[in-house]
């Protein structure tokens, strides 16, 4: 039996007869020769089936293959510069695992399809080359995130998904029934728990799915997204900014290093990514509002940025920008206020360049017991649900802070995508719960 290899390993087997198991990606044929292109998830392999070299029945089978039929091809590998991937296989044998019938053909054909059709067929759309490129960049981003924190003294401590209280305001909570008339909420952020784990371990991070009942249909919002959240003790807003900046530079560097082929397939202008170096420009909210007004935005001091504002602020930027000094009025209860200016918080948002908007939000936390108690009251939050969180200010409270980075927003920016929906295998949005 010839050895089974994956297409990505072809280079090591030139001149050998091997077997590749995959699916029919495409087929060109004439009377005497057929060129099935096989895909196995690791790459594409153009195969050559010559009528005169094969048993008649086998050649007929090859000629009549249908798109996405599952097949195993055995043959000899050759280097061939003109073939996708650089190698070609001369077919010696072919086994059909399942033939897609003509009566019910694979729905995604090489022609253009509308986005709703593709989203409805997301379970199949994931087989396409563009989706492979995006999902592989996502994988690289996630690996880089883990490598960064794991090599900088952070301990991974995952936080619960069922939570008894809100972290990021009550308007985007998903409520679920939780036994005996109790209500639970899907987590909006692991931050509050991170504060407890950081007090235990010094520096921690959590990384998991996060939920927001976002009732607006935008190109930046999912209702379920993945967020990485580091938290550090004996840390100030400046420390938070420094780690966030380093993390972004590290991630982009890794993707450039390992995923050049994917970026090329996505037609990403990598020269834009090569410019992502520290230091990132810094701006205070007051100046951001003035800049926006000068660009025609209706924003007034005290208002939160909308998606359009974020685009305006970053469309002509080469590097991510760090904005701090946001008004306390629209920020979550846990933010520490700036001691020199009580109306603004010690928080930072990092907006990606080229109009991609906020990818990171974070800051320094309120560490004083009495101040925190009054914030919980001002925000009309149920004090009972926060008793454990309040304990953290009673037993060895220290200045501390952290941030959250949305993986999908980060991937959309790095890949240069118009919309966030392609950055996760099965996106959950206001009007989409299927497939
Ligand atoms: O700015 P946010 O709401 O911050 C927090 O949740 C903090 N508790 C994090 C912390 O300090 N530990 O969200 C952080 C990031 C955003 O910058 C964005 O990248 C992403 O999470 N994000 C979303 N991504 C996709 N869809 C949504 N609906 C998102 N909401 C936030
Ligand atoms: Mg935010």
Image (cartoon, rainbow, N blue to C red):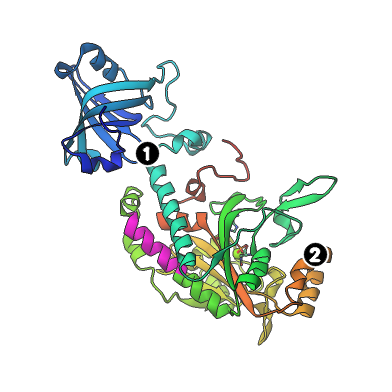
Q: Is residue 373 left or right of residue 61?
A: right
Ligand 2 quarter of the rendering: bottom right
Quadrant housing the C terminus: top right
Alpha carbon separation for disc pair 1 and 2: 49 Å
- Measuring from the top left, give residue 239's x and y in whole percent: 54, 78
Q: Is residue 249 left or right of residue 38?
A: right
**Left or right of 79 in this view: 296:** right
Height in image: 130 above or below 102? below
Residue 137 is at least partly visible in this image: yes
User: Residue 392: x and y, percent?
Assistant: 73, 73
Task: Please tell me whether mark 1 or mark 2 is closer to you in this view.
Answer: 1
Circle 1: is it few (<14), some (14-19), or many (20+) Cα within 10 Å? some
| Disc assigned to residue 176 | none
As helix, strand or loop, the secondary structure at mark 2 comes to loop
- The residue tagged 2 is 381
Which residue corresponds to the image point at 16% horizontal and 42% vertical from the top-left?
81
**Can residue 355 be seen by looking at this rendering?**
no
Q: Quadrant of the N terminus?
A: top left
Q: Residue at x 51, y 69 (%)?
A: 295
Which mark identifies residue 41? 1
The one nearer the camera, 35 or 266, is 35
Indicate the position of residue 132 as horizontal and vertical percent values.
Answer: 40, 43
Question: Which residue is drawn at the image coordinates 44% and 74% (left, top)?
Answer: 280
Badge 1 vs badge 2, beta-carbon distance below 8 Å: no
User: Magenta-highlighted stretch: main secondary structure?
Assistant: helix
Describe residue 351's horizontal placement relative to residue 157 as left or right.
left
């Amino acid at each position: 039996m010839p050895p089974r290899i994956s297409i990505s390993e072809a280079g090591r087997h030139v001149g050998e007869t091997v077997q590749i198991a995959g699916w029919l990606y495409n087929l060109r044929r004439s009377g005497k020769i057929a060129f099935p292109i096989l895909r196995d998830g690791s790459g594409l392999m153009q195969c050559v089936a010559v009528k005169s070299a094969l048993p008649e029945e086998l050649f007929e089978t090859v000629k009549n293959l249908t798109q996405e039929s599952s097949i195993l091809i055995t043959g000899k590998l050759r280097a061939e510069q003109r073939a996708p991937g650089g190698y070609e296989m001369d077919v010696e044998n072919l086994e059909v695992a399942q033939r897609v019938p003509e009566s019910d053909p694979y729905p995604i054909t090489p022609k253009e399809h509308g986005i709703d059709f593709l989203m409805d067929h997301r379970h199949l759309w994931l087989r396409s080359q563009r989706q492979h490129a995006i999902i592989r960049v996502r994988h690289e981003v996630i690996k880089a995130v883990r490598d960064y924190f794991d090599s900088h003294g952070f301990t991974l401590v995952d936080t619960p998904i069922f939570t008894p209280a809100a972290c990021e305001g009550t308007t985007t909570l998903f409520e679920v029934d939780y036994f005996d008339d109790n209500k639970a909420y899907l987590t909006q952020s692991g931050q509050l728990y991170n504060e407890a784990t950081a007090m235990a371990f010094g520096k921690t991070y959590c990384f998991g799915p996060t939920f927001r009942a976002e009732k607006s249909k935008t190109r930046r919002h999912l209702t379920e997204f993945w967020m990485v959240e580091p938290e550090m003790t004996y840390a100030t807003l400046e420390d938070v900014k420094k780690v966030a900046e380093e993390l972004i530079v590290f991630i982009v560097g890794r993707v450039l290093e390992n995923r050049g082929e994917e970026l090329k397939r996505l037609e990403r202008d990598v020269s834009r990514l090569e410019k992502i170096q520290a230091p990132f420009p810094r701006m205070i909210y007051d100046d951001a509002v003035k800049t926006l007004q000068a660009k025609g935005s209706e924003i007034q001091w005290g208002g939160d940025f909308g998606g359009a504002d974020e685009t305006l602020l970053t469309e002509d930027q080469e590097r991510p920008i760090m904005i701090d000094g946001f008004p306390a009025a629209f920020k979550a209860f846990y933010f520490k206020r700036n001691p020199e200016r009580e109306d603004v918080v010690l928080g930072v948002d990092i907006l990606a360049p080229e109009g991609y908007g906020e990818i990171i939000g974070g800051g320094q936390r309120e560490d004083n017991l009495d101040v925190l108690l009054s914030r919980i009251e001002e925000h009309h939050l149920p004090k009972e649900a926060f008793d454990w969180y309040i304990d953290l200010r009673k037993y060895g409270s220290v200045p501390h802070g952290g941030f959250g980075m949305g993986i999908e927003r980060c991937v959309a920016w790095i890949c240069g995508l118009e919309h966030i929906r392609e950055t996760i295998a099965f996106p959950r949005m206001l009007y989409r719960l299927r497939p």
